[in-house]
Amino acid sequence: MSDSVYEYEEEYEPGGLHPVHIGDTFADGRYQVVNKLGNGYSSTIWLVRDSTSTNYASLKILEARRSESPTELHVLEHLEATFDAQDEGSKHVVRMLDHFLHQGPNGIHLCIVQELLGPSLALDVKLFWAISYLPESTSSRLVGQLILAVAYLHKRGIAQGDLHAGNILLCLPSPLDPDIDFTTVVSNTGELPSEPSPHKPRYLVEPVTQRLGSDLLQSCMIKPYIKLCDFSESYMTNMVDPPKFGSPHILRPPEGILTKLPHATLESDIWALAVAIYQLLTSGGLLFSEYDDSILEDMVLTLGKLPEPLWSKWANRACFFDEEVNPVIQAFNIKAQTTSFRQKVRGWTRDEGKISALAAMFETMARYDAQSRSRASELVQSDWMTNYCRPYMGDDVILPTERRKVRVNRFVIDPRVLNAP
């Protein structure tokens, strides 16, 4: 999902997004729009009520042009065809409930109905704690669930391809707190042209998760469960026309930065998973910066010289290293010193057992040689997963919380007072 609160007005055009208003119905009246959940880079996501059950669901409406090559639908259909409730990873991957085509003023749109989930981990969940990052028990629980989700996908030949925090959603608690109001709508007409157009909505809607802010987030963090979603950038074995590799650069392995990967791979997922895990545990970056050269510099400082032909493909390497991989000291360069996964992890915990287990796992995941990276199934059996994640993953585990006034996405709300152990 996108970090933007509102989609852009120019996205509403023939071939683009479908204009949606509160109260609109889809699939011959079965689904009625109640509120907006969010927007992606080529879709909008809406809270709908299913008239056949009165339950809430999530309705994702793709751009008309993206509906012609429905990668996500193919992946979701494969997941439904191979669903295995006995596999613990199945609980951490979103499920499709329905799909259909909808004719609108901008074209024919693929619509995907999925189970309703909560906010994403892109929100500042760490701000509920005075230490400004997740307690080890909570972050270890989420990391374990994420590993299970990726292993479940990889077992089915699916590379997710976009493992950023915005695609990791928290499950809503059951029963849902009755004080949490999904129905109040916040709209905005300031981004739209004054002249009405059949191709554009009359108003834009703020995502309900934005308005509910920390109230909803705190409810989801009592006993957090996550589900991985959004397969628009995914690849499946033998996929005929896969989407181009589109992962954010901070999540890309070196071959994804210096060469043109035709699509996501299981191996690129493992690298991205290492970055995502480190971010969940420490609220920091395994590799810092959004710029390719700086990301590559971090890689070399941590893992050593890039193998050929990658080293030669890095056009600006001389600005950072000589050919013997000695850092070129520059006035603005505050990093230019070698490090290791063990040193990186030591900044998060002083427990030597945890340091050894986590560093060892990272060393098998973030390798230059893609084929030598760990398989997701091996991560499930790793020392880190077994001894430091699973103890916090049970349904009966009580996780620490705090009474704290926090700011989450512009809203300052007193979080719910929970019983701490």
Image (spheres, rainbow, N blue to C red):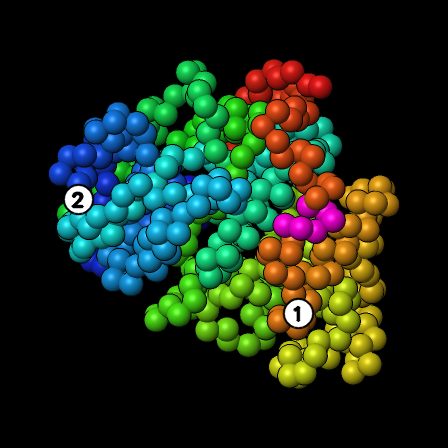
Q: Main secondary structure of the magenta part?
A: helix
Q: Position of residue 377 (x, y in %)?
A: 60, 55
User: Please, is residue 139 above or below residue 215 in the view?
Assistant: below
Q: Bounds of the magenta span?
A: 380-385
Question: Is 71 left or right of 92, judged from the image as shown?
Answer: left
Residue 344 is situated, as x and y percent measured from the top left of the image, at 78, 53
Given residues 95 and 100, the one toward you in this image is 95
Query: Relative to the observer, which residue lies in front, 30 or 122?
Result: 30
User: From the viewer's perspective, is residue 277 above or below residue 269?
Assistant: above
Alpha-carbon distance for marks 1 and 2? 56 Å
Query: How many numbered circles does the render carry?
Result: 2
Direction from residue 174 to residue 104 in the image, left or right: left
**Label 2 crowding class (10 Å Cα cut-off): few <14, some 14-19, many 20+?**
few
The image quarter in which residue 303 lies: bottom right
Mark 1 vs mark 2, foreground winner is 1
Up-down: is 203 above or below 104? above
- Residue closest to the far front: 86
Within the magenta stretch, is there residue 384? yes
Q: Which amino acid type is marked by label 2?
A: Pro
Q: Which residue is mark 2?
A: 196
Question: Element type at marker 2?
Answer: loop
Residue 94 in view, yes or no = yes
**Measuring 37% from the left and 25% from the top, which residue is drawn there?**
182
Crowd rating for badge 1 (residues with CA inside 10 Å; few <14, some 14–19, many 20+):
few
Image coords of residue 127 (percent x, y): 64, 32
Q: Is residue 296 visible?
A: no
List the residue tagged with mark 1: 372
Q: Quadrant of the C terminus?
A: top right
Magenta-drawn stretch contains 389 = no
